């Protein structure tokens, strides 16, 4: 038995944020019914294609374990069928433009009238306020949520991160909201609205930078590299390069082979508890008791010198040798792993973190698995559905429609 067995999700989402949410629910066993326009489907089916006329990896990697039904919700018969779906399902998830479902005649009040137990979940760009009706995409969310202004080098332009914290990050937040609402419904018997704004989700992931904004009012941020370099702070949390955000100074350092390998680097943290071990490893035993280096507060103005000495040592080792040596001494380090290295990591396959999936049109492809592991609810990763692949099946087993009813709906262009 899966954790969400028996839960029916009406998936009206497209592109990334919403499909991330519904895919996670599907991995946990929910019956996710992906509603798509006949003949068109989710826009990402055709975006960034690497094989002509085959669903793109963008689509397949965000829509595992779902069933696809085609439905023209602008058609009267299509609206009738959609109404029946609302009555039968537990959750509806959408990431349309603000007010789109309301203009179709299916606003929150109408949904409550049709199914008081329905949980209606939405991804929005911004919450209530001056930008509530603005469209938001991944990088816009990173900029508006505080990530870009605090990412990059101090003397450079703001930078977005390669992690999709705006889209996928919001989808993960929304999934938590949905299961929380499902849990509360067990007591209340009522559905409710669940909204997740992309700006809000990015800000939640940037909370340490908001922490530093408040600390800055009481003095410089001593663990930032610019403090040791004598550069004054402004009135906003600055970009800090690869400095650690946790208060323990850390940086990305070169390892052996960096001249030809763009990923021959390691992240190295000078954790106070293992400072003496660090000194021994890098050949600076005198720093252990030297008053200029022995205490963290004394080391802060000298971080460039300290990390320079550490890097002299890491450049004599591969990133994996650095990890082996340092982990044995409890020194926190981590290799910079490329996507190629990750895709070839057998241990990640064994844990289901990455999985191989067979697709009837594109063949075998690699994708991410469920990052959340439950001991009593294992997650299988099943291929994404072809457009409308399950239309007849869903109309029969969810709505109880007969073959004649389905044939009529098809004639009318409703499905």
Image (cartoon, grey):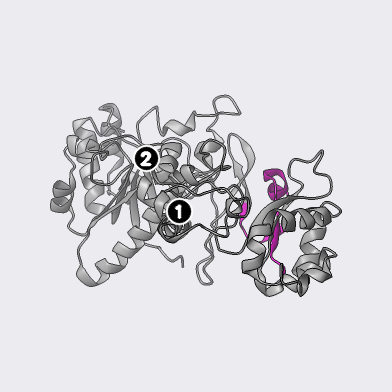
Mark before the other along the chain sequence, 1 or 2 = 2
Does residue 250 appear to the left or right of 119 in the view shown?
right
Residue drawn 54% across the image and 50% down it: 382
User: Tags 1 and 2 in contact by the CB under 8 Å rule?
Assistant: no
Q: Is residue 348 visible in the rendered structure shown here?
A: no
In what element is the residue under mark 1? loop
Q: Nearer the viewer, residue 256 or 247?
A: 247
What residue span does the magenta drawing correspond to? Answer: 330-354
Question: Is-magenta flag for residue 138?
Answer: no
Q: Nearer the viewer, residue 411 or 206?
A: 206
Q: Where is residue 251 in the image (x, y as percent from the top left)?
A: 66, 54
How many marks can you see?
2
Question: Is-magenta flag for residue 352?
Answer: yes
| Label 2, residues with CA under 10 Å away: few <14, some 14-19, many ≥20 | many
Q: Is residue 356 visible in the rendered structure shown here?
A: yes
Is 336 drawn above or below residue 271 in the view shown? above
- Measure how far apart labels 1 and 2 are at the Cα level: 38 Å
Occupied quadrant, residue 130: top left
Residue drawn 85% across the image and 55% down it: 317
In what element is the residue under mark 2? strand
Mark 1 lies on residue = 206
Circle on res. 103: none
Is 305 drawn above or below residue 3 in the view shown? above
Query: In which quadrant of the rendered image does the C terminus lie?
Result: top left
Mark 2 lies on residue = 69
Q: Which of 78 and 349 is in front in this view?
A: 349
Does residue 315 appear to the left or right of 143 in the view shown?
right
Occupied quadrant, residue 297: bottom right
Is 30 drawn above or below residue 15 in the view shown? below
């Amino acid at each position: 038995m899966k954790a969400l067995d028996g839960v029916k999700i009406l998936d009206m989402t497209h592109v990334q944020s919403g499909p991330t949410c519904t895919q996670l629910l599907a991995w946990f066993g929910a019956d996710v019914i992906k509603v798509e326009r006949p003949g068109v489907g989710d826009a990402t089916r055709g975006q960034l294609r690497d094989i002509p006329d085959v669903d793109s990896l963008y689509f397949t990697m965000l829509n595992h374990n779902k069933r696809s039904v085609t439905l023209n919700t602008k058609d009267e018969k299509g609206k009738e069928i959609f109404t029946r779906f609302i009555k039968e399902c537990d959750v509806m998830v959408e990431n349309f433009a603000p007010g789109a479902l309301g203009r179709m005649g299916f606003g929150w009040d109408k949904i409550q009238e049709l199914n008081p137990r329905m949980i209606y979940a939405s991804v929005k760009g911004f919450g209530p306020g001056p930008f509530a009706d603005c469209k938001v995409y991944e990088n816009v969310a990173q900029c508006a949520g505080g990530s870009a202004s605090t990412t990059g080098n101090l003397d450079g332009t703001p930078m977005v991160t390669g992690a999709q914290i705006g889209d996928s990050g919001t989808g993960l937040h929304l999934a938590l909201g949905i299961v929380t609402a499902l849990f509360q419904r067990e007591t209340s018997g009522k559905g409710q609205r669940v909204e997740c704004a992309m700006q809000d989700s990015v800000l939640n992931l940037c909370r340490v930078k908001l922490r530093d904004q408040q600390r800055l009012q009481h003095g410089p941020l001593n663990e930032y590299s610019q403090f040791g370099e004598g550069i004054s702070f402004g009135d906003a949390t600055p970009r800090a390069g690869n400095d650690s955000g946790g208060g323990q100074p850390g940086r990305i350092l070169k390892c052996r082979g960096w001249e030809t390998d763009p990923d021959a680097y390691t992240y190295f943290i000078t954790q106070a508890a293992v400072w003496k071990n660090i000194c021994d490893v890098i050949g600076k035993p005198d720093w252990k008791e030297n008053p200029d280096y022995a205490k963290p507060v004394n080391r802060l103005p000298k971080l460039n010198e300290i990390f320079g000495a550490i890097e002299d040592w890491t450049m004599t080792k591969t990133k994996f040798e650095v990890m082996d040596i340092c982990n044995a001494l409890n020194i926190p380090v981590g290799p910079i792993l490329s996507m190629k290295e990750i895709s070839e990591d057998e241990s990640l396959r064994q844990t289901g973190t990455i999985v191989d999936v067979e697709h009837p049109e594109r063949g075998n492809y690699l994708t991410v698995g469920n990052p959340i592991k439950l001991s009593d609810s294992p997650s299988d990763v099943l291929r994404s559905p072809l457009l409308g692949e399950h239309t007849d099946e869903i109309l029969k087993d969810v709505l109880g429609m007969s073959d004649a009813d389905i044939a009529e709906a098809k004639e009318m262009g409703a499905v």
